Image (cartoon, rainbow, N blue to C red):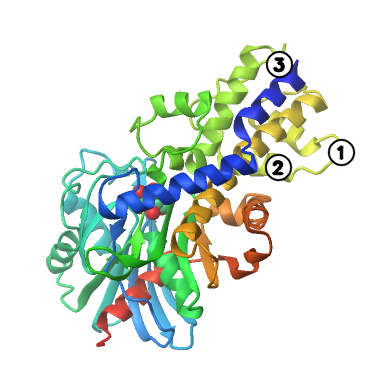
Amino acid sequence: MLARKLNDLKKSFLLSKTEILDIAKNFKMEMSKGLTGTSSLKMLRTFLKTPLGKEKGQYLAIDFGGTNIRIQLVELLGNGSFQTKETISFRLKDLEVGYDLTAEQTTATELFDFIVTNLKTLLKEKKPYALGHTFSFPCHQISVDRAVLLKWTKEIKTAGVEGREITDLLEKALVRQQLYQINPVAILNDTTAILLTASYSDLRADIGSICGTGHNTCYREPYEPLTRKPMIINMESGNFNGFPRTIYDMVLDQASEKPGQQFLEKAVSGHYVGEIARHIILELVEQGLLFRGQNYPELLPYSVQAQHLAHFLQDQTPELQNISQWLARTWQIQYTSAEERAALQTIASLVTTRSAQLAAATYAGILLHIDPHFQSEHVIGVDGSMFEKMPAYMDTIHKILQNLYQDKINHVRLRLIKDGSSVGAAIAAATCLETD
Ligand code: GLC
């Protein structure tokens, strides 16, 4: 019974080569549609210049990616490399300490004052600094330094920020704290920051992506229709919907903050993969296929996380003893058969493999769009916990691209770009100060 159920799950989760190619073609179509009109991809312009790798100097970088914020002083060394001089990280929400700047009762002023108060602690001297701000939410970019937040994602709800120009909110907070010497010159998405960081040391880089808590990709468009020039486009690809969804995706979506939106992100990103697995596990429990006769805890929404799936996948012991210990420790389930533990490992593998397959399909779609005959070399820079830490993830993406494009794949490299979100903000600031 359990084996049959797992087989059915395999059929609904794993994508065949033909399906992956179809998704890639759908993605390519959505890109073209979105460049000139509307599609599930927002195709947001960035106006940023590609760095040459020679940019130098010290810059402040804010990395506002979710409830964790990191501020760094980054020194660009001018030879494609950089050094981080200072770092502070802080949380926008700490219920134990008793504050939550992501709640709808909080105002934009309170949020940005909190960020600037923290920034102040990093400044050792009163020197002028140009600042780059990686703000990883869908924004309508007006210019390199001005962007209007379209809508919050990642469960943030702070009032009075949606529809506002973000640099203006930051500048006013800087003025309130008399930090006149800090000059915000660039605001960008984290995917763009990854691409800039990859490009800083390798001019072949033309795709930047995040496979972490969220999921999104940007790329260098050879011909942006409005400016008729090359431009980096933030696709907000997490909202792509041209792929087959399972019943578990639908249940997850209905119970989520924003039903009907961010379908790809809900299938790919670290925030959601554990939740998909939780729905599957609960179904198997209800069907009497898992944990029969055992007391097990109520598995609350989002209590199964990507890191747990990674832990299941890492267990290479013959009887899956690590999973067994984990179950006893975390869910107080003392007795499981090896078959049940293998089922948990299979579920983790199905959900994370599909995530990698979908991400790979979108990369293939972008390559089809920018270079249909594979005439140039490409580097895809990726950061995020799924890409970096989920067992077999990077390898699966690589194998899919290889399988789709055979020997032409030698033209494509996947690179982990660690810390690209804040370094990219510094690079953006540097390119904004360059005169042509
Ligand atoms: C969400 C945001 C997007 C960001 C991604 C990764 O999808 O909407 O802007 O790039 O998360 O952090």
Please report the residue visible at 22 percent of the width from the left and 57 percent of the height from the top. Answer: 112
Residue 397 location (% of width, % of height): 61, 53
For the residues labelled 1 and 2, the Cα–Cα distance comes to 13 Å
Q: How many other residues sit within 10 Å of disc 2, few (<14), some (14-19) or many (≥20)?
A: many
Q: Which mark is residue 318?
A: 1
Q: How many other residues sit within 10 Å of disc 1, few (<14), some (14-19) or many (≥20)?
A: few
Residue 20 falls in which quadrant of the image? top right
Front one among 303 and 31: 31
Residue tagged by mark 2?
313
Please report the residue visible at 35 percent of the width from the left and 55 percent of the height from the top. Answer: 136
Front one among 91 and 188: 188
Residue 298 vs 388, above or below: the answer is above
Residue 348 vs 12, above or below: the answer is below
Residue 182 location (% of width, % of height): 22, 75
- Amino acid carrying label 2: it is Leu
Residue 245 location (% of width, % of height): 50, 31
Q: Is residue 279 visible in the rendered structure shown here?
A: yes
Q: Is residue 66 visible in the rendered structure shown here?
A: no
For mark 3, give the secondary structure. Answer: loop
The tag earlier along the polypeptide, 3 or 1, is 3
- Amino acid carrying label 3: it is Leu
- Amino acid carrying label 1: it is Pro
For mark 1, give the secondary structure. Answer: loop
